[in-house]
Image (cartoon, rainbow, N blue to C red):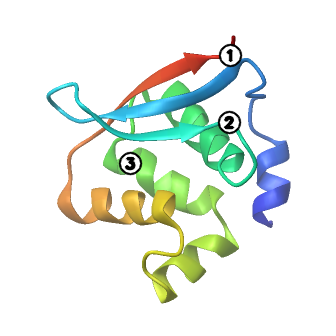
Amino acid sequence: MAFADKLQQLPPISHLAGLQLLDEHGAAVATLHNQPGQAGSVAVYAALAGRFGAITVQAAHEGLLMYAEHTADARAHPGKHPNIDRLLALIEAGGRYAVKLLPAA
């Protein structure tokens, strides 16, 4: 199933302006905005946080499956898909990200 099809199966994110990923000290390491080019990643990360409570190694593995065809492209072209690269790095290094949802105004 393609990424676009998988997105249709995820919970809606219209109530979100975006989300932040927080390291173990509570510092924001990334902010994803609910806007073209990032909305799909907001949906993926929000769904993972909802299911796993955080972006864990197990959540990252599932996230790579959600990204479908983009995961292979990210592996072939590091830096092209930073939100996928982040999941790959998390799997390699371990750890977790807390997720702070940013409500839409």
Q: Quadrant of the C terminus?
A: top right
Q: Residue at x 54, y 25 (%)?
A: 50
Q: Are marks 2 and 1 in contact (CB under 8 Å)?
A: yes
> Relative to 26, is 34 above or below?
below
Where is residue 33? Give x, y as percent: 60, 37
Q: Residue at x 59, y 81 (%)?
A: 73
Q: Which residue is mark 1?
A: 104
Q: Amino acid at mark 3?
A: Gln
Q: Which residue is mark 2?
A: 34
Side of 82 where 33 appears, left or right:
right
**Which dot marks residue 58?**
3
Side of 19 where 7 appears, left or right:
right
Helix, strand or loop for disc 1 = loop
Where is residue 41? Give x, y as percent: 61, 48
The quadrant where residue 92 appears: bottom left
Where is residue 97? Give x, y as percent: 31, 37
Q: Sequence-wise, which precedes: disc 2 or disc 1? A: 2
Front residue of 39/5: it is 39
**Discs 3/1, front:** 1
Pick out the residue farthest to the front.
Answer: 105
Q: Amino acid at mark 1?
A: Ala
Q: CA distance from mark 3 to mark 1?
A: 28 Å
Where is residue 27? Give x, y as percent: 23, 30
Q: Sequence-wise, which precedes: disc 2 or disc 3? A: 2
Q: CA distance from mark 2 to mark 1?
A: 9 Å
Q: Residues within 10 Å of mark 3 (few under 14, many from 20)?
A: some
> Relative to 94, is 98 above or below?
above
Q: CA distance from mark 2 to mark 3?
A: 24 Å
The quadrant where residue 24 appears: top left
> Relative to 90, is 54 above or below?
above
